[in-house]
Amino acid sequence: MLNQVYRLVAARQFEVQTVAETVTANDLVIRPRFLSICHADQRYFTGNRPQAILKQKLAMALIHEGVGEVVEDPQGDFKPGTLVTMIPNTPAEKDPIIEENYLPTSKFRSSGYDGFMQEYVCLARDRVLKLPENFDPQMSAFIEMISVGVQGLSQLENVMDADNKVIGIWGDGNLGYITAVLVKQLFPTSQLIIFGRHQSKLTYFSFSDQTYLVDEIPAGLQISQAIECTGGRGSEQAIAQIIAHLRPMGTAILMGVSEDPVGIDTRDVLAKGITLRGTSRSGRQDFEKAIDILAASPVTRERLQNLIGYTCQVHTIQDIINFFEHNLTNYWGKAVMEWDV
């Protein structure tokens, strides 16, 4: 099968390249419908990665968040037109201990491996999950990011002690919002506190029990478990505040990505017996759990639909460039494009 792939070849420059795809009996051919941008896509688009990394990974199709329609299923399990979510993590092996998203042999779309900006995407059938018909397709476009939140909270459940009275989330951006929505569903009896830098963004967290600006946290405030969703330059301050306010033997889940090393006060980590657990990406089981959570809770779906920010339909390469450029100034929410190239 000949396929048109829209690859980033240099900062802010896309080209259409024709690729010969081999479709096996275990594959599905998917037509992308709605695609959502994450910060990693923008870092590639703007060239805001080390030149050695860009040289190694480009040319490459971006986007690892999206839904599409089934075009062909050789086994007939999926009818043509069925809306599905596409799983970007592609494991090459199974391990009895290590989850698929942590295996170094796994490939991840839009990170050295073509993402979903293609005319058609050829996926192994275990990388596809059918979506309920009542799901908003634009919200469904970022189920991958929702599954990342599920992965983080699943790790928290696995590691934390029995104290879940107060859960604190550092970060008032998209990841913090998604994780907060999931906390209210998965830990309904816990008090949820959000710590952020922008009062205007904290207003979106109206479903939380309390919000604080990070420079106005009461000195004596204690939390049971913590989740860091800041990333970037804010990670160091967030981790320092988490260590200061976390109760002894508490767990901190680290989810934010930083390009540079951050300092951690190991003396206090040791003195308080704190557990730091890093999480990254997600796997099929996280997608399955995310869909189950959304299907069971209309309130959760409604809250996540509020995260839909800038949307537009794209037809040409210039439309794609305009979409990425506009998203750079998007203050709140997830940017979603209707893929019609």
Image (cartoon, helix red, strand yellow):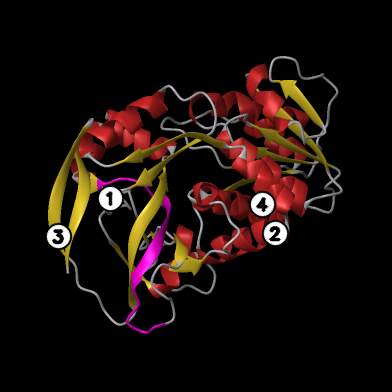
Whole-percent x, y for residue 310 in the image: 47, 32
Question: Disc 1 and disc 2: Cα gap in Å?
Answer: 31 Å
Q: Give the residue type that dot 4 points to.
A: Leu
Q: Residue at x 65, y 63 (%)?
A: 292
Residue 249 lies left or right of residue 239; in this view the side is right
**Does residue 183 appear in this view?**
yes
Q: Quadrant of residue 251?
A: top right
* Mark 2 surroundings within 10 Å by alpha-carbon count, few (fewer than 14), some (14 through 19), many (20 or more): few
Residue furthest toward the top? Answer: 215
Instruction: Tell me which segment is drawn in magenta.
Output: 61-76
Residue 192 lies left or right of residue 150; in this view the side is right
- Whether residue 216 is situated above or below residue 33 in the rendered picture: above
Q: Residue at x 47, y 58 (%)?
A: 102
Numbered badge on residue 158: 2
* Mark 4 surroundings within 10 Å by alpha-carbon count, few (fewer than 14), some (14 through 19), many (20 or more): many
Magenta stretch: residue 185 in it? no
- Whether residue 225 is situated above or below residue 260 in the rendered picture: below
Q: Secondary structure at mark 2?
A: helix
Q: Nearer the viewer, residue 6 or 152?
A: 6
- Which label's residue is closer to the chain start, 1 or 2? 1
* Mark 1 surroundings within 10 Å by alpha-carbon count, few (fewer than 14), some (14 through 19), many (20 or more): some
Q: Give the residue type that dot 1 points to.
A: Gly
Which residue is denoted by mark 4 in the rendering? 153
- Which label's residue is closer to the chain start, 3 or 2? 3
- Point out the image quarter for the N terminus: bottom left
Q: Give the mark toward the camera: 1 or 2.
A: 1
Q: Residue at x 63, y 37 (%)?
A: 177
- Which label's residue is closer to the chain start, 3 or 4? 3
Residue 200 lies left or right of residue 217; in this view the side is left
